[in-house]
Amino acid sequence: MRTLLALFLLVPLAVGGQDWKQARLAMVRDQIEARGVRDPLVLAAMRAVERHKFVPEELQRRAYNDYPLPIGEGQTISQPYIVALMSELAGLTGNETVLEVGTGSGYQAAILARLAKRVYTIEIKPVLHARAETLLAGLGLANVTAIEGDGYFGLPSAGPFDAILVTAAASHVPPPLLAQLAEGGRLVLPLGHPFSVQDLVVITKHGGTTTVRNVLPVQFVPLTSRALGPGP
């Protein structure tokens, strides 16, 4: 029994009291790098930010698995690969001001905090905003400002933004967000019917015109906004 117990203690647990760092390294290697994300800054951020802290305690065992998880209020924390991909598509180098629409758990904002100079994140649901704001502050992310509000309208007082990430599906590009995008900036969002498969797109602004690049099909929860009417 002593030998068996010793062997058991030497083997890292796969869940629960596991070695979270090893779980993150495996997540990045098997789910993110394996799918083609190459930006070293993004990969470093994904390895560093503790995703299990952004999910409900009862789901922490599954925090590094390859799928989204519910976080309450009808919302989810996105699949790790999608978080990494959207971060890479933003094309950040460390000097940018970024707006995130849809704070949710705060995980995407925490990743962006390691990639940009300044991050503003807006959440329309008060419960999620309060929870994420407390968590982000507790992690010492001084370059992140969490705001409760309607992200469809952006944050004109802090713009223009070098990058804007929308983490919920919209049937059209919100005009206020496009107006607040800086010259040469990138707007990354899931575009399409909110209750079907959408296209993850990158919209780039140059000389008063925009270009749109389709990246891959995705499925996000709908964007909530008073501009879009009542939800389901």
Image (tube, rainbow, N blue to C red):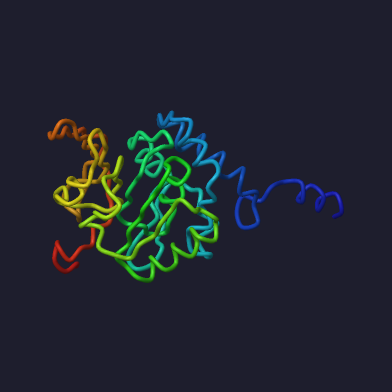
Image point (48%, 58%), residue name: 136
* Image quadrant in which you'd find residue 1: bottom right
162 vs 7, left or right, is left
Which residue reaches farthest right? 2
User: 191 above or below 70?
Assistant: above
Q: Find residue 217 and report its horizontal and vertical position in percent.
A: 25, 40
Percent coordinates x, y for residue 25 in the rendering: 57, 39
| Image point (24%, 37%), residue name | 202
Observer-nearest of 123 and 77: 123
> Which residue occupies 55% across, 39% down?
26
* Nearer the observer, 42 or 35: 42
Residue 175's spot in the image, x, y percent? 14, 50
Q: Position of residue 146 (x, y in %)?
A: 39, 60
In-image side of 216 versus 14 (left or right): left
Choose between 132 and 58: the one closer to the eye.
Answer: 132
Quarter in which the C terminus is drawn = bottom left
Q: Residue furthest bottom?
A: 127
Q: What is the number of callouts on the image?
A: 0
Residue lying at 33% horizontally and 62% vertically, measured from the top left: 123
